[in-house]
Image (cartoon, grey):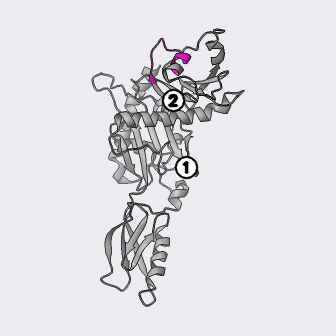
Amino acid sequence: MRGLKLHVLVGFIGFLHAISMAAADGPTNSVGGLSISSPTQLQDWQKHLTLGPGDVLQVSMYGEGSSTRPGLVIGPDGRLNYLQARDVMASGLTVEELRAQLETVLLRFYRPPVRVMVVPQAYKSKKYYLLGSVVQNGVFSLDQPVTIVEAIAKAQGFVANAQRRSGMLLVDLSHSFLARKAADGSFQNVNIDFEALFLNGDLRQNQGLAPDDYLYFPPLDIKEIYVLGDVRAPGVLPYDKSLTAIGAIASKGGFGEKAYKSKVLVIRGSLQHPQAMDFNAAAVLDGKTLDFKLEPGDIIYVSRRPWAYAEELLEAGITEFMRAAIVSYTGQHVGPFIKEPIIK
C-alpha cells in the first residue's frame, strides 16, 4: 500500500515543479489553494508585520536631500542607527511605529515638522526551517506569505530515487510534521494531514507558514525507534527486528529515577491518526508478562506521573518526538547554518 501511495506522489512532484515555475505569475488560488491570495487568509503576524534583526531599510527625512540612507540593517540586538537617532530599538515595531519613533528622537535636533520615510528593502528577520527528505535542506526567508506546498517547491521538491524506474519518493509522510512556536516559546504540533495533502491533493491541508516554523519530512529509508520522556538518555535508535521496548529503553540508559513504569506509552503509525498503546514495564521487568514488540517508527514515551488514558500523553509524546527528530536530523545531516536547533 505504501508503495502504491508513493507512486501517486510522483505525479504530484511534477505538480510542485509547475508551481515553482509559475511563482512569478503570482497567487494561483484562493482559500484551500496553492498559495495565499487574499488578505483574509493572512495570519495575525502578517497583518501586523513587525521588523527584526537583519531587516534592511532605506530611511530618509522629507526635505533633507542629504539625509537618505539606503541599506540600513537592523542589528542583532534589534537596534537601528540613523543620523542623530542612535540605538533606536526597531525590533518588534511595525514600519509605521519605527517611523514615529525616529521622528520623536530627531525632533530634538531638527526644527519641526520632521517627517521620516522608512522603506523596507529586504525582510530577513522572519525565517522558517525545512528539513529532511527534500532536495534543499536549510533555513528559508519568510519575506512573503508561503504555504507548505510553496515551501517544498522552493526547496526543489522531495528527494526521489532516480535509479528506480518508478522514481519513488523517499519521504515518510506519516511521520512528517509542522512544529510551530507558541507565545510561551514552546513548540506545538500543527495538525496537518500530509498524506491527505500530497497523496490525495487535499489543499485544505496546505497551511501558510509562520516565523520559526519547522517543517520536517523524515527519509523513508531510515528505520528508527524513538525513546523519549523519563529515560536517562532520550533519543533515537536504529530499528532492529529483534528490538523490544524494554531493550530499547535499556539501550538509552534505562528508566529515570521518577519514571512511571506501570504504564509506558507507545505511539505507532501516522502522527495525524496515531495508534496509542501501553504496556506494563514493571511487570515485564518482574518476569510477569512478555516484553512489547516494536515496529519501525514507534515512539516510546515514559511519563513521570501516573496516567489512565493514552490521550493524556499523546500530545506530550508527539511534541517530544518532534524535538528529538529535529535535533537528531540537524546534528547528523545539516550544515553549520543551524548550529543549535531552536526546539529545546
Tell me if residue 301 comes above or below residue 128 in the rendering. Answer: above
Residue 322, numbered label: none
The outermost residue toward the front is 257
**Residue at figure coordinates x 55%, y 18% from the top left:** 245
**Residue at figure coordinates x 45%, y 88% from the top left:** 113
Q: Secondary structure at mark 1?
A: loop
Query: What residue is pinned by disc 2?
Result: 234
Mark 2 crowdedness (10 Å alpha carbons): few <14, some 14-19, many ≥20: many
**Residue at figure coordinates x 42%, y 33% from the top left:** 328
Mark 1 crowdedness (10 Å alpha carbons): few <14, some 14-19, many ≥20: few
Residue 173 located within the stretch drawn in magenta = no
Q: Earlier in the sequence, mark 2 or mark 1?
A: 1
Q: Looking at the image, which is closer to me, 3 or 190?
A: 190
Q: Between tags 2 and 1, which lies in front?
A: 2
Question: Where is residue 62 shown, x and y percent of the image?
Answer: 38, 83
Query: What residue is pinned by disc 1?
Result: 185
As shown in the figure, which amino acid type bears the numbered disc 2?
Pro
Residue 242 located within the stretch drawn in magenta = yes
**Residue 200 seen in the current view:** no
The outermost residue toward the left is 163
Q: Looking at the image, which is closer to me, 36 or 318?
A: 318
Residue range of the region highlighted in magenta in the rendering: 237-248
Question: Where is residue 175 shown, x and y percent of the image?
Answer: 49, 30
Snapshot quadrant of residue 273: top right
Snapshot quadrant of residue 171: top left
**Residue at figure coordinates x 42%, y 67% from the top left:** 79
Q: Secondary structure at mark 2?
A: loop
Question: Where is residue 70 shown, x and y percent of the image?
Answer: 31, 71
As shown in the figure, which amino acid type bears the numbered disc 1?
Gly
Q: Looking at the image, which is closer to me, 186 or 222?
A: 186
**Residue 251 seen in the current view:** yes
Distance between mark 2 and mark 1 Cα atoms: 22 Å
